Image (tube, rainbow, N blue to C red):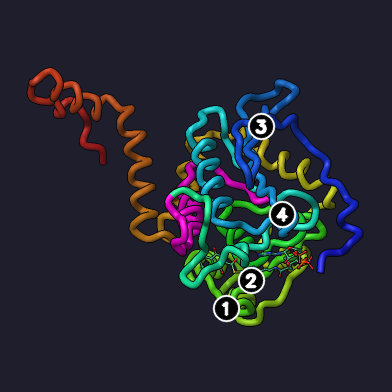
Amino acid sequence: MADPADADRTITPALAWEGAADFTDIRYETAAAFPDGDGGGRIAKITIARPEVRNAFRPKTVEEMIEAFTLAREDPEVGVVVLAGEGPLAFCSGGDQRARGDSGYVGDDAVGQKGVGRFLVTDLHVQIRRLPKPVVAMVAGYAVGGGHVLHVCCDLTIAADNATFGQTGPKVGSFDGGFGASVLARQVGQKRAKEIWFLCRQYDAAKALDWGLVNEVVALEELEEETVRWCQDMMRLSPFALRLLKAGFHAEEDGLAGIQQLAHDTNLLFYGSEEAQEGRDAFKEKRRPEFERFPKRP
Ligand SMILES: CC(C)(COP(=O)(O)OP(=O)(O)OC[C@H]1O[C@@H](n2cnc3c(N)ncnc32)[C@H](O)[C@@H]1OP(=O)(O)O)[C@@H](O)C(=O)NCCC(=O)NCCSC(=O)c1cc(O)c2ccccc2c1O
């Protein structure tokens, strides 16, 4: 049970967030990363805004998150994305059990899902893994069930002192044997990942830090300030280097799909070369490409 005293604690806002799109279940906001003008770019923040159910997600919530992550990806100003939950009590409590049908989660109003059970959150996991910008989970309170899997899928996690982590699937007749198990095992090791899933215990922030499940633990009040500091540090670095690093980390873990992303990221670089441009120009000019001009590098 959440500590009732936590309900009166407030996370200090660190940036002047501006609403950047209208959603029902989430908020999508962006802010200048360096309000003092000491750098450029923006940070995007996606907040699950259903505190009455500890930020559990229904199909519509996931649909909106997918749209928001697409907005963040496509915005050339945005360098880092923060994923958060509304309020001090929960990051996310996983799938909304009231929307759980007999063959997945069912949405009444979500596009293309009327009455059809799905695990749409799977698409969101893949999207976060593929997003060519760092994604930081900012965890206050509970990150449990599918909410725990969400933070596992993020690149970094900054936790508040009241954060509580755990998987609940086997308690409620569910499990995530996808990234929820495999990526978790990469993060904390097989024995601990199996413990988390097989015993369904809850772990406090100190234990999560000790296990390498989170990157940093701070007072709840300072959670956003600390998260933004980490984002600012990344915003000062080469975005393409970070993109390639993320793809590199996932290349092996995500199998052929991971290698594909890394390979296509190298295409982006190759297209900028004279050698690649010679191929394109020769085709357009209907002539033989002069690739002999380019070195056969050792
Ligand atoms: C998160 C809690 C530990 C918090 O406990 P606390 O005592 O602080 O608060 P309450 O229990 O009183 O909750 C307040 C209020 O919120 C409602 N609520 C909380 N979580 C959910 C939820 N997930 N769905 C619906 N409603 C929720 C709760 O009923 C209360 O409402 P009242 O009207 O009674 O006031 C604790 O709440 C808790 O343990 N929650 C459940 C956590 C859980 O089991 N989540 C689901 C796991 S399964 C899952 O998430 C999942 C999702 C997927 O999309 C998958 C996809 C593919 C494979 C697997 C998937 C999967 O397993």
Query: Residue 277 at x, y = what percent?
Result: 24, 25
Residue 74, above or below 84: above
Query: Residue 78 at x, y = what percent?
Result: 57, 32
Measure how far apart labels 2 and 1 are at the Cα level. Answer: 12 Å
Query: Residue 278 at x, y = what percent?
Result: 20, 24
Residue at the extreme bottom: 199
Callout 1 touching callout 4 (CB < 8 Å):
no
Is residue 216 something one can see in this rendering?
Answer: no
The amino acid at mark 1 is Gly
Along the line of sight, the residue nearer the viewer: 43 or 145: 145
Q: Which residue is mark 4?
A: 139
Tell whether circle 2 marks a residue whose Cβ is less than 8 angstroms from ligand 1.
yes
Q: Which residue is mark 1?
A: 173
Ligand 1 is found in the corner quadrant, namely: bottom right
Q: Which mark is residue 167?
A: 2
- Residue mark closest to the camera, 2 vs 1: 1
Measure how far apart labels 4 and 2 are at the Cα level. Answer: 15 Å
Residue displayed at 50% across by 53% down: 124
Residue displayed at 60% across by 74% down: 169
Measure how far apart labels 4 and 3 are at the Cα level. Answer: 21 Å
Q: Which residue is mark 3?
A: 19
- Residue mark closest to the camera, 1 vs 4: 1
SS class, disc 4: strand
